[in-house]
Amino acid sequence: MQIIKSTKELQSIRRGISTKIGFVPTMGALHEGHISLIKKAKKQNDIIFVSIFINPKQFSANEDFSSYPKKEESDIKICELCKVDYLFIPEISSIYSQNEVLIKAPNQSYILEGFSRPDHFNGVLQVVLKLFGLIQAHNSYFGKKDAQQLFLIQKMVNDFFINTQIIACETLRQNDGLAISSRNIYLSKEERKEASLISKSLYCALKIISKNEFDTSIIKNEMINILKDLNVEYIEFVNKDFKEIKKVQLKNTIILIVVKFKTIRLLDNIWV
Ligand code: PAF
């Protein structure tokens, strides 16, 4: 595996590759979820690029960019074990310049995750567009767990005619259903137990829908009953255009949920 730190070096290596490239962008602190993306990329491509870049532009002022977990040494080991070909770990200064052209995320970026973090998706799209330009992968891999991010990246690819195929990968779960996330390690024992109720509430929603109940407020109430005293930030139903809906549409609905444990926000969703 070759570690690349500079954008110039990356571009020169990229010019020499003519086989099929798979790309997995990350912010590091790699876990099973990332590994499953890398494995899928490995199966479907000849050469794999992974990037590790903690993107300052996607953190709001009240979020602590500086305390985001950094695990470069173990991340490098994981990538080596996964037989990644190129690991791109750029400095902030090599990615961003002064007074640069800015991407503005569309309306769907100001609801849900973007509601309390209005510039978050501008920052995500800005960096992902740069990474796509640098790596020019045939296939790029993103988790369905970050459903709104996935939607906006797919939209950017369509709107800007970017030549990469977005591969949406299933959410990886622990035995009790909790979606795997780098934030799970911050939960206390008790919180970790309670966190399994998040996926339970989503599966309960599926069960209700399978009995032909499509009214989202009824489904939401049932979910809230399961979540009991947990601090639910939102439960929302959207269609695949990320417009909020009042009636579930089969094969065109995503149920999204965020539950807070102190400052830790756990996201999950299910595609109906
Ligand atoms: O999902 C993430 O880890 C980040 O938002 C991404 C896509 C790597 C952009 O910084």
Image (cartoon, grey):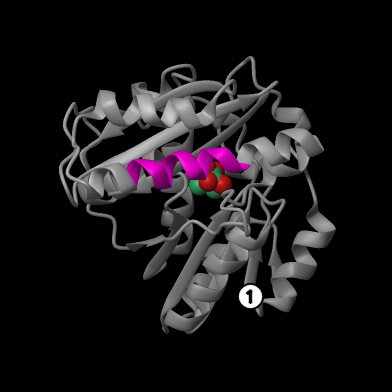
Question: Is 45 rendered above or below residue 113?
Answer: below
Who's the residue at 52% across and 79% down the image?
42
Residue 11 in the image: x percent, y percent? 52, 64
Give coordinates of residue 156: x percent, y percent. 29, 44
Mark 1, residue position = 84
- Image vertical order of residue 133 relative to residue 68, above or below: below
Q: Quadrant of residue 224?
A: top left
| Amino acid tagged 1 | Val
Pick the front one: 4 or 150:
150
Q: Disc count in the image?
A: 1
Q: Is residue 145 magenta?
A: no
Q: Relative to 131, is 3 above or below?
A: below
Q: Is residue 12 left or right of residue 148?
A: right
Left or right of residue 210: residue 194: right
Q: Main secondary structure of the magenta part?
A: helix
Q: Position of residue 14 (x, y in %)?
A: 50, 71
Residue 45 visible in this rendered orientation of the protein: no
Helix, strand or loop at label 1? It is loop
